[in-house]
Image (tube, coloured by chain):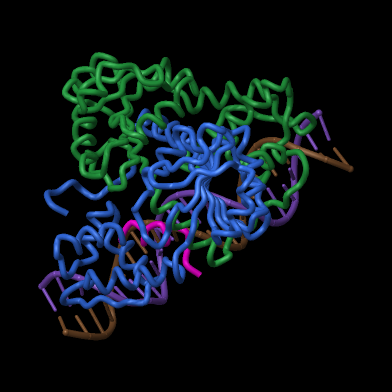
Chain colours: A green, B blue, C brown, D purple
Amino acid sequence: MIPERTIAHLSLYRRLLDDLLRSDRECVYSYELASLSRNKPAQVRRDLMAVDYAGSSARGYEVDALVESIDRTLDGPGRTGVALVGVGNLGRAVLHFFMGRRKRLEIVAAFDHAPEKVDRVIHGCPVYPIERLGALLAEKGISLGIVTVPASEAQKVADLLALGGVKGILNFAPVPLRVPRGVYVEAVDMTALLEKVAFFARKGQAPERLPIEEEG
Amino acid sequence: MIPERTIAHLSLYRRLLDDLLRSDRECVYSYELASLSRNKPAQVRRDLMAVDYAGSSARGYEVDALVESIDRTLDGPGRTGVALVGVGNLGRAVLHFFMGRRKRLEIVAAFDHAPEKVDRVIHGCPVYPIERLGALLAEKGISLGIVTVPASEAQKVADLLALGGVKGILNFAPVPLRVPRGVYVEAVDMTALLEKVAFFARKGQAPERLPIEEEG
DNA sequence: AAGTGTGAAGTATTTCACAGCG
DNA sequence: CGCTGTGAAATACTTCACACTT
């Protein structure tokens, strides 16, 4: 059973490795990945213990093989459909952000209740009226939801998503969601994040980091 | 020295308490705050040990006094100015999200290099050309930055912010930032968050949560 | 000599469990 | 009695340090 943090780290490493692949880099050492991801080599090596791939002490990790191994660990079989609910400012931005970013994990439908927003395509994603949520979740085999509605609507939307069989929710609404057992929720509490930054910035308590060097 | 998580929790509790205040609630027990914030009563009580306020076993916590104590813990003296850099889809959404949310912590300037975006006011915030960043950080006494530029620009922006004396950065760009010692960075890696949701949703490994009850 | 994989140690965070209070 | 505050235990995560490989 892989720890939560490890999964987040692997996602980041994969992204960095994709960049390296594009620049035709063949191999990479843990200390290089560490520098790119702003953490320690030992952390990288421990994270990589979760994927079924071993590096070599001479060459480090082969970039393409490592990416494939991370793919096997992180990705499910086939494509995973995601529904985004709430096509306001934030919803559109998130839609735009995710468009074309990962081909195995795709926002395939967006929902809103404002009549002027529905039956359009925004950033390449069709927008449907919220009434059709249940039907379309089933029809399109959607298993994840992104909540970008205002706080007042968020719980209702979470209930609908859970009822429709969604097993994971990424919640941008500034309110904690109640979901049935077996549904995984990740909250992005932007207010709390900014206030945390404000607090530690003021206290001058930035955590110890690797020294800043050239390249990396 | 207060732990990172505690600060994030306090921010959330304050928001929930503000709602309670608005509905004229006088007192609240740790188990109620726990239910609202979706964690355990013992967690709430431990978090509240960080603020200088004691509840009573009979009445729990007085909402207004507790909010004030959390204010004293989290907020600095006076107002804290924030600069947002990158007025694209995400930047505008974040701007909109934060507008008027907390009066002590305010986005006072936004920056972009696209000529058609600058010298306008978006969601109540003036947008300046990126060339004026350094000057305006000093002039407006800005100590925090929000980075909402594309990955390719993010490091340059972080350098400018750090150079301008910013002590904390909330980074939405999908790339880890290098900053000088003493600058606190909080990264919001939306791709990693969604992939984490996808992973644990698929594995059916939603963490144990409090049972779902009525009210809360 | 310089890297990987990993047990063991260290640190951070959560939770238990219970003394003490009103 | 039911709650708060908190040592102590449990758990989660990170880092060290070193045997082993090339």
Question: Can you tell which quarter of the image residue B182 is in?
Answer: bottom right
Query: For residue B8: magenta?
Result: yes
The residue under the point 57% across, 56% down is B184
Along the line of sight, which residue is nearer the eye, B137 or A49?
Answer: B137
**Residue B126 locus on image (x, y percent):** 47, 46
Check if residue A53 falls in the magenta segment.
no
Residue numbers of the magenta segment: B1-13
Which is more toward the observer, B113 or B154?
A: B113
In the displayed structure image, the side of residue B121 where residue A57 appears, left or right = right
x 24%, y 14%: residue? A139
Instruction: Give the answer, above or below, for where A139 lies relative to B204.
Output: above
For the point 29% across and 20% down, the residue is A127
- The x, y position of residue A182, in whole percent, is 28, 36
* Quadrant in which the N terminus of chain A appears: top left
Q: Is residue D18 left or right of residue B78?
A: right
Q: Is residue A49 visible?
A: no
Q: Along the line of sight, which residue is nearer the eye, B136 or A45? A: B136
Residue at position x 20%, y 48% in the image: B211
- In the figure, is residue B182 to the left or right of A151? right
Q: Say if B147 sits above or below B6 in the image.
A: above
Give the overall secondary structure of the magenta segment. Answer: helix
